[in-house]
Image (cartoon, grey):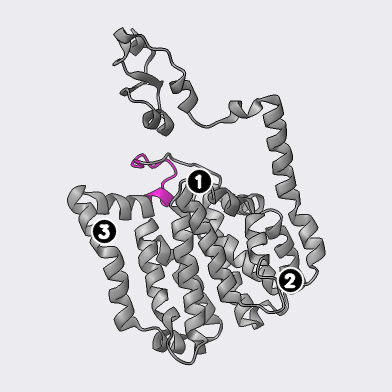
Amino acid sequence: RLPSYLLCLFIIYLLIKFLKSDTLSKYVPAFILLTTPEFLLHAGVVSTDVSLLLAIVITMLAYWKTINEEKRTVWSYLFFVGIGLGLLAKGPLIIILTGPPIFIWCLLDRKRFKPTFLKLPWLIGLPITALIAVPWYWMAEIESPGFVDYFIVGEHFKRFTESGWSGDKYGFAKSQPLGMIWLFLFAFAFPWIQILAVMVWKKRKTLWKDPWVSFLLLWLLWTPVFFTISRNVIHTYVLPSTIPMALLLVHWWKDHKNWLRLAMIFPVAIVLALGFLVVTNGWSTYLNTDKYIIQHQEVSTTYKDSPIIYWQQKTYSGRFYSERPTLILNKVASLD
């Protein structure tokens, strides 16, 4: 869990260095993100989504810096570094989640296409991306033949087009109603996404006239728009939207006293809920792990090598914590 925590802190550090505001506390973006359920959750879980998020942040901020600077800087090359890191974290999804919002933003003012092509160092940048990502894919394919086909075709196309995709080796099919991603966004980015929605409505007449606001808004909206047509979604897919959400709120940070009070709803509710579970010892009921069951098993010497039997589906925690083999049974007759 430590890498995810450190990456979340590093993302916050990048935002603070990027903003460099003299009129606003540097802790504002940190406060917003750490009181956003989805971001806070990912600061303490084992997940590649945080690695992808870092890659998206580097790519998008580097693009903005590059086209707004007269000369090429380190940000120009970080754009391609971000894509390379994203290819390592989650594959081509990095291009799908960053390319379209940049392209649509350029369509709003076609003069933006020119600096996009001229200021980004494509001849040097693309080899940088390839140098970061290609060796790992090559070695993975050698070690596990068929990996590239499974990862590129299966994980990036069938996962989102087939709700009951049976080829998933590391998870499970997540069949949801179409558009469920928007409910996830409003639930797991509470209360900031609701605050932002109100601000967007109030400023709806001028939204697309401000380059920075329109850039962030497209970045925020593209991810849920993309996943709207997929039934195979989980709440973690809204994580990329939390960064532009925070940056927009920082941009419009005026009536911050009221916002601060609203933002405290989530952390206070969590503290109260955890306190209640600890006092009532109810927390053990909701633990999503077999760790403690396995640790407290009493197995006689005669049966020490016998497998742990699971009904229909194994759990990751069971396989991780057990030194004994695990077995799946799908039929009652198999118990005989």
Task: Answer few, some or many: residues within 10 Å of disc 2's Cα (few below 14, many 20 plus, some between 14 and 19).
Answer: few
Q: Position of residue 182 (x, y in %)?
A: 61, 54
Real-space CA distance between mark 2 and mark 3, rounded to the nearest whole angstrom: 43 Å
Q: In the displayed structure, does residue 304 sit left or right of residue 219?
A: left
Q: Secondary structure at mark 2?
A: loop
Residue beneath the point at 51% across and 74% down: 61
Q: Earlier in the sequence, mark 3 or mark 1?
A: 1
Residue carrying label 2:
253
Q: Bin the neighbour count of mark 3 within 10 Å (Cα to Cα): few under 14, some 14-19, many 20 and up.
A: few
The residue to which callout 1 is attached is 45
Indicate left or right for 305 with 42 as reference.
left
Q: Is residue 159 magenta?
A: yes
Residue nearest the observer in this picture, 254 or 175: 254
What is the CA distance from the residue labelled 3 to the residue labelled 1? 24 Å
Q: Is residue 228 visible?
A: no
Q: Which residue appears at 45% of the width and 88% of the height?
A: 115
Q: Amino acid at mark 2?
A: Trp
Q: Earlier in the sequence, mark 2 or mark 1?
A: 1
Q: How many marks?
A: 3
Report the quarter where the C terminus lies. top left
Magenta stretch: helix, strand or loop mostly: loop
Report the disc number at residue 136. Answer: 3
Residue type at mark 1: give it.
Answer: Val
The range drawn in magenta is 157-169
Q: Are marks 2 and 1 in contact (CB under 8 Å)?
A: no
Say above or below: 229 vs 18.
above
Q: Measure the alpha-carbon separation of dots 2 and 1.
A: 30 Å
Q: Position of residue 320 (x, y in %)?
A: 38, 32
Contact between marks 3 and 1 (CB within 8 A): the answer is: no
